[in-house]
Structures are given as C-alpha cells and as structure tokens.
Amino acid sequence: MFEQEVTAKFKNIPTPFYYYDVEVLKQTLQKVKEESNKYGFNVHYALKANANNKILNIIKSFNIGADCVSGNEIKKAIECEFSPDHIVFAGVGKSDAEINFALENDIFCFNCESLQELEVINELAGAKNKTARIALRINPNVNANTHKYITTGLEENKFGINLWELDAVIAALKEHKNLKLIGLHFHIGSQITDLSSFKTLCLKVNEIQAWFVNHKIKIENINVGGGLGVDYHEPDANLIADFAAYFKLFNDFLELLPNQKVHFELGRSISAQCGTLISRVLYIKKGVNTNFAILDAGMTELMRPALYQAYHKIENLSTSPPSPLQLERGVRQDGVRYDVVGPICESSDCFGKAVDLPETLRGDIIALRTAGSYGEVMSSAYNLRDRVKAFYSDEI
C-alpha cells in the first residue's frame, strides 16, 4: 500500500497519470545485477516493456544492455546512451530502413527470424560494405504455459526459424558473405511464472546446440530471451521477482561450451512493479446486476486488461484517511463489489469485474498496480484522448 504522505500528494496532480517508484526500480535492478553477475550473464532490457526516458536512463546506469524490436527503439536506446555494442535487434518484421539504421550504428547483433530475413540483411549489409553480426532466433517448440497472445515459442507462432529449416539456413549462411553468425536466440513467451518452462527451454537449447556442434559450427553466444513473470495479485508481498532462482536454473541446466556467453532479454520483471496508473472516480453508476466505478483512466492508458484480459490489482487510495465526503455520509461500507471501467466508448474498456472495494465515491483516487511494463508504452490517443503523463517518487 502506498504511504499516506505520498498518496496525499496525488490529490494535487490532474489524473490519470503514471507514478513510478524510483527506489523500487533501483532495488530491482540491483538484484538483477547481483544475481546475474554470479554467473557472468549478460542482461539486456526489453524496451518494448517501457520506453520512458527516465526509466531507461536509470536502467542504463546499471550497465544493462538494450533489447529492441524496432528502429525507433534502437534510436531511443542510443539517445539514452546505451552502448550500440550492447544493443540486440529482434522482431519478425524488420523493415529495410530499420535494418539500415541498425547497420549504420553498428549494433551488437540482429536476432534473425527467417531465411528471407537473412537474405535481406546480407544484401543491405553488402551495399554498405559491412558485415552484420547475427543470431538465429530458433523456435524451440516449447510451451511457456502462459496466455496464448504472449506465447512465442511454439511452431504455430509467427516467431523464429523452425528446427526443420536449419539445414537450409546453414546452407544459406555459406552463401551470405556479409553475415557473421555469432549466436543462437530463443524466446518462448512472457509472464512465465512456472520456472519448469525455462528448464524445458534449457534442455531444448542443449539439444539444438549439439546439432550445431555436430555440424562443426561454433556458437559464441546463447540468448535465452526473457519472459520471467511478476506477481500481479500481491505486488507488495512479492515486489521483486525471484531472480536468484531464475538465473540459477539457467546456470544449472544450460550446457555451455568453453567461453560461451549467455544473454537475457528481461523487460516486465525489471520495470513492472515500479509503475502504477493513478486515476480518479468520475461516477458511481448503479446497474441491474452490478455497480460501476467509472474512472477517468481507460484502455487508452492501460491496454492490458482489454487486450489480454489481464489482471491488475485495484486499490482505492482515498479510504484512509477519511475524505470529507466520507465524513459527511458516515463510515463507508466494506466489500462493495464494482465493475471498474474506463470512459472509452468500447465495452472492452474494463479494468476488472466484480472487484471488492471499500465503498467508493466520486473523486476517490484509484491505483492500478504493477503497471510499469506494457502500460505507458502501449498508451494511445484513441477518442482523441490526451497522452498520459508520468511522475516520479523522487520528484513529488
């Protein structure tokens, strides 16, 4: 729960807005570095989770690299002074302009996802008289046991090179003189809370690496992606993900070659818990089967519930201390059930159904927790809404 003195400051800020707890972010990053350094692992932050400048500058200060999935993310990473030799570029649909920008900035590695992409990067690199460093993103056909929209490692997904294509890929690499194979890349999905999925990935990586060894192909880097989940239901109890168990699992089960480096692309697990969407109640509406708490924030500010039916813990920050309205009306009821919805003209604009809250009144401040990843970065101006602003714990 937010400290009362911080919550009191929210009353003077126009809502909705994102609030970032800088100390939580720094504590999380410290744990990431502490646990990854035990094994000499390299960590890259996935900018798709949060591209807020201040957040990125803090992350960069911990000597973490950047994982980008667009040319503009590469541009943002460079603007925030991430070193190009610690930038990896993933994505199933890289445009020619994006590839050229990455080549011009001499990034560390392209994570390549198809035979045709190899051909295109080779051609564009040749035109610049450059050699592009690449990793093959291989689809390991491992089930991440997560939501179907954020599962990426099955053969039915659009991502990666399938195992049965490897012979053709190796043959193509022999012809593409402007490509240098430096790694293998894997990513099986996001918000993975069952670590056994990562063990399965490790065993599959070992099998695939053995195939390359048998073909006398040396691999310098193994990139196992990211996907570590966070606790959306009890954020205060589990504010920092279990990085110790996560990194230890890869150390225990990956069979590495001498001097081989391991890379991770973490996003959600680094920034999710430091961010909260702060909103106000516009109206309380009595329905036939439910009550509606209508907020001034909507799917334009936090898309995940509408897109994935994702859960975010919803807290009424105005119930302690009592508000003037509460004092006028008497003690609020406990455990009133609301559908918490936004103002957008879409029925999917709903943050939670049948949410138990203390009696909620117009003007109450509402917090939607664990919104530091895939929150602000996915916001939009649909309905010509104003873009959401951000505020930080060390500034208010």
Image (cartoon, grey):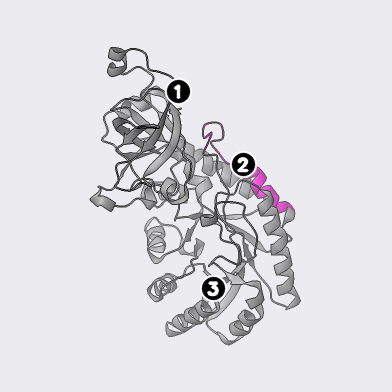
Classed neighbour count for the residue bearing mark 3: other residues with Cα under 10 Å, few (<14), some (14–19), many (≥20): many
Q: Amino acid at mark 3?
A: Arg
Q: Residues under labels 1 and 2: Cα distance?
A: 32 Å
Q: Secondary structure at mark 1?
A: loop
Question: Which is nearer the eye, 130 or 75?
Answer: 75
Q: Secondary structure at mark 2?
A: loop
Classed neighbour count for the residue bearing mark 1: other residues with Cα under 10 Å, few (<14), some (14–19), many (≥20): few
Question: What stretch of residues is rendered in magenta?
Answer: 233-252
Is residue 374 within the magenta segment? no
Horizontal side of 27 relative to 380 (left or right) equals right
- The single residue placed furthest to the front in the displayed view is 288
Residue drawn at point x = 71 percent, y = 68 percent: 209
Assign the C terminus to one quadrant of the image: top left
Q: Give the quarter of the image for residue 302.
A: top left
Q: Give the quarter of the image for residue 217.
A: bottom right
Give the residue number, with chain letter if any, for mark 2.
Answer: 242
Residue 133: image tag: 3
Of the residues tagged 1 and 2, which is closer to the observer? Answer: 1
Q: Amino acid at mark 2?
A: Asp
**Mark 3 or mark 2: which comes first in sequence?**
3
- Which percent across, then down, holds residue 286? 33, 29
Give the residue number, with chain letter if any, for mark 1.
Answer: 335
Residue 113: image tag: none
